[in-house]
Amino acid sequence: LHEKRLAAAKKLSAEILKEAQGLGFKEVRFSVDAAYDEAAIASSGGDSVEYLFTANPGYPLRPLRYTASGGEMARIMLALKTALSRVDRIGAQVFDEVDAGVGAVTGRLVGEKLARLAADKQIFCITHLPQVAAFGGAHFFVEKAVKNGVSAAAVSLLDNSAREREIARMLGGKKQSTDLGLKHAKELLEESRK
């Protein structure tokens, strides 16, 4: 069992690293460590598995949970889910702010990766980043309101015109976007379709 885990860890490490390199990391290193402890043998074996990570040259691999920022963690999770999607039978995946802590350039890379993943699976992605939203096949607007002291969420599917306005709003943070914001939103949407 340990030998099989070591082989699987090596293969998964290479797959995650390959996927992570397309997500804005310059010199990322990643490894799945399967450490065997004969004293800890149980019905599932004697291995403890840890993800090791560094995004900085000159630094050693350390446990992902201690070293990754929120944005790094989100991108590694996307890389992991992308690598595993080739062998799982899960038809839909949900990503809740997988772009957390990333900027516009990396957000675009995340959007591109999600769009490629959506070619084979149904993807639901909650995002506040217009660079990610532009890559969606459909765009839903979710708004929370409080009525009579009770919170409720309303969800609406945006048509092309409303989608452009919403992406422009996301870009500028204004309720009513400017002509320049709308132009930028249209450019993002056009580029995402290429």
Image (cartoon, helix red, strand yellow):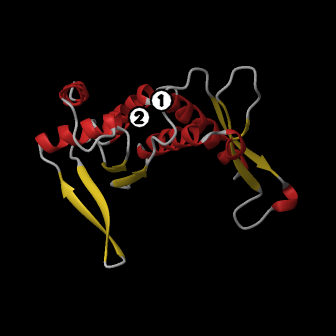
Q: Identify the residue at the far right of this view.
A: 39
Residue lying at 37% horizontally and 46% vertically, measured from the top left: 127
* Residue 54 locus on image (x, y percent): 68, 31
Residue lying at 41% horizontally and 32% vertically, measured from the top left: 107
Residue ID for mark 1? 23
Question: Of 82 and 8, which appears nearest the observer?
Answer: 82
Gap in Å between the C-alphas at discs 1 and 2?
A: 6 Å
Question: Of 159 and 143, which appears nearest the observer?
Answer: 143
Callout 2 secondary element: helix
Crowding near the residue tagged with mark 2, few <14, some 14–19, many ≥20 C-alpha atoms within 10 Å: many
Question: Of 98 and 10, which appears nearest the observer?
Answer: 98
Cβ–Cβ under 8 Å for marks 1 and 2: yes
Q: Amino acid at mark 2?
A: Val
User: Would you identify the image quadrant in which residue 60 lies?
Assistant: top right
Q: Amino acid at mark 1?
A: Leu
* Residue 183 locus on image (x, y percent): 19, 26
Q: Quadrant of the C terminus?
A: top left
First in residue order: circle 1 vs circle 2: 1
User: Would you identify the image quadrant in which residue 136 lies?
Assistant: top left
In the displayed structure image, the side of residue 95 where residue 174 appears, left or right = left
Q: Is residue 170 visible?
A: yes
Residue ID for mark 2? 110
